[in-house]
Image (cartoon, rainbow, N blue to C red):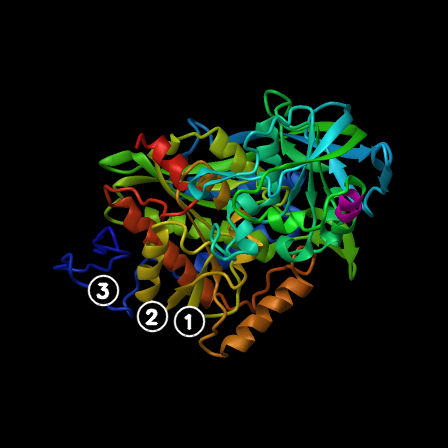
Amino acid sequence: MKFKRIFCYAALFGLILTGCKKSEKLERDVPLSPIDGKVFSTQIAALASDSLEGRKPFSTGEEKTIQFLKTEFEKLGLKPGNGDSYFQKVPMVDIMSKPSGSLVIKNKKGKVTLKYLDDFVAASRRVQEQVKIENSELVFAGYGIVAPEYGWNDYEGLDVKGKTVVVMVNDPGFVDSTLFKGKTMTYYGRWTYKFEEAARQGAAGVLIIHDTKPASYGWAVVRSGWSKSKLYLDSEDNNMSRANVEGWITSESAKKLFQLSGVSDSLLIKAGQKGFKPVALNLKTSLVINNKIKKSTSNNVLALLPGTDRKDEYIIYSAHWDHFGKGEAISGDSIYNGAADNASGTAALLEIASAFTKLKKKPSRSILFLSVTAEEQGLLGSEYYTSHPVYPVNKTVADINMDVLQPFGKMKDIILVGKGQSDLDDYADEAAARQGRTTRGEPNPSGGWYFRSDHFNFAKVGIPALYIENGSVSVEHGEAWGEAQKKDYNDNRYHSPADEYSTSWDISGIIEDMQLLFNVGYSLSNEATFPGWKKGSEFKAVREKSLGK
């Protein structure tokens, strides 16, 4: 480990540890933070109540939720986190995109006609009523990745202005463990990155080839998500920096394109080999997309505990307050309360904030408690904060994110999503060891879970970010039982009205998780050094640049 830290917690809720020296270890049965969960139960019950109507952005449920959070932060004596306000307005645009017809791809030999939703999906982030591409040439650009740290550039020597790039999902490590991070997906493998990079390259359109295994979900997920309107951040340029058209095609459709183009399916294999060069497919396509546009504004909620002698450096605790509001009734219930997802994380944010305010010795660095909007719509609230930071990115030490804390009781383990990315793993390892627990990475790292909650937007701008998932090895019932609880939640309550709070919840495991996260942040808040990204992380270069290294 490249750093040493003093875990010397003086006067934590009246507990005074005397004679604490650098080499001493606290006994594991000694409470490491003033967290007991008593208030947590009332907070989560309030946040997951029917009165908040599922906490959907732009609804009366939003107004009730953000005012509740503001009031709770005020009770704790925390200062407004955005000047004299507890709110940061987040402008958004709702776009319902629909192609005017089928996607027809052709050359002199013939054509392939792809049916909307069955064979392809397409939309546009551009805030225009109509967007189109005309006679756009198709180019196969492999994985669509530019990754200097891995010596990889699928766009090298390629001018794609006005063209439509066809790319693969995931990254080369999925098929060759010697490349990138092997089975652990990097951000270069996420579909969001593919669209971003194509736009940076100047492409008019981008189509991702869907494949269930490397994507970690079936076509039905793509079809369902892309058949609805989508929320985006309302940028100053009306998202004109994005490609005209973004979409997906099925793997079967890709095979038809290759056949018409006269290239072999082996191209998909070659794309995962070093030295791959993009291939012009000698195909053209045109597409018109009609957009229905509605602009609205939501809110992030911010509260600040100023530090003492390093108050211009910041630790962020984040959790999204939003859920889906009211929707399709299931078993007679139409309110999507989102108790675990993410009233749990929001209540934990308040509990940890309360713990910090009760310390007799205030932290050296400032602590920002940030509850963000529109995570369920694509991590939009956190994206807005990191692109419009209230506090400088290069003065932000770390983000500690909380999303879906489960009431399954105490666990012997804890999962660090994206384990191996940053030095924050080492802090979490030590905090877990003090509880007699172990840490491990997520079971399916090829699924790209590190890129699916709000901490990721902090990582994108270089801020080390920690995101935990509750463990599986139940202290009382064992691992099989713990895995069964997770499966039951995912199958029967996740994103459904059944995700409700109950007084029968066993929150003892959540309390331990909150204690762990408190101690990680407390340790960071009293240091003079900054945690960094580990070698090979795709976020290391941007951090070093922001710090002037």
- Which residue does the image show at 30% across and 50% down from the upper left? 522
User: Residue 255 in magenta?
Assistant: yes
Query: Are the two marked residues, 1 and 3, in contact with CB atoms closer than 8 angstroms?
Result: no
Residue carrying label 3:
26
Q: Secondary structure at mark 2?
A: loop
User: Looking at this view, is 453 or 539 the one in front?
Assistant: 539
How far apart marks 2 and 1 lie (CA) works out to: 7 Å
Quarter holding residue 107: top right
First in sequence: mark 2 vs mark 1: 1
Image: 194 above or below 238: below
Residue kind at label 1, given as amino acid type = Lys
Q: Please state if 206 lies on the left or on the right of 68 as rendered.
A: right
Q: Secondary structure at mark 3?
A: loop
Is disc 1 surrounded by few (<14), some (14 to 19) or many (20+) residues within 10 Å? Answer: many
* Residue 454 shows in the view: no
Residues in magenta, as a range: 253-259
User: Residue 294 in magenta?
Assistant: no
How far apart marks 3 and 2 lie (CA) works out to: 12 Å
* Residue 96 shows in the view: yes
Query: Are the two marked residues, 2 and 1, in contact with CB atoms closer than 8 angstroms?
Result: yes
Residue kind at label 2, given as amino acid type = Gly
Residue carrying label 2:
436
Instruction: Pick out the residue farthest to the bottom.
Output: 477
- Which residue does the image show at 50% across and 57% down from the upper left? 177
User: At which x and y percent is residue 93?
Assistant: 67, 29
Residue kind at label 3, given as amino acid type = Leu
- Which residue does the image show at 64% across and 42% down from the upper left? 377
User: At which x and y percent is residue 39?
Assistant: 45, 56
Question: Mark number for residue 412?
Answer: 1
Q: Secondary structure at mark 1?
A: loop
Q: Quadrant of the C terminus?
A: top left
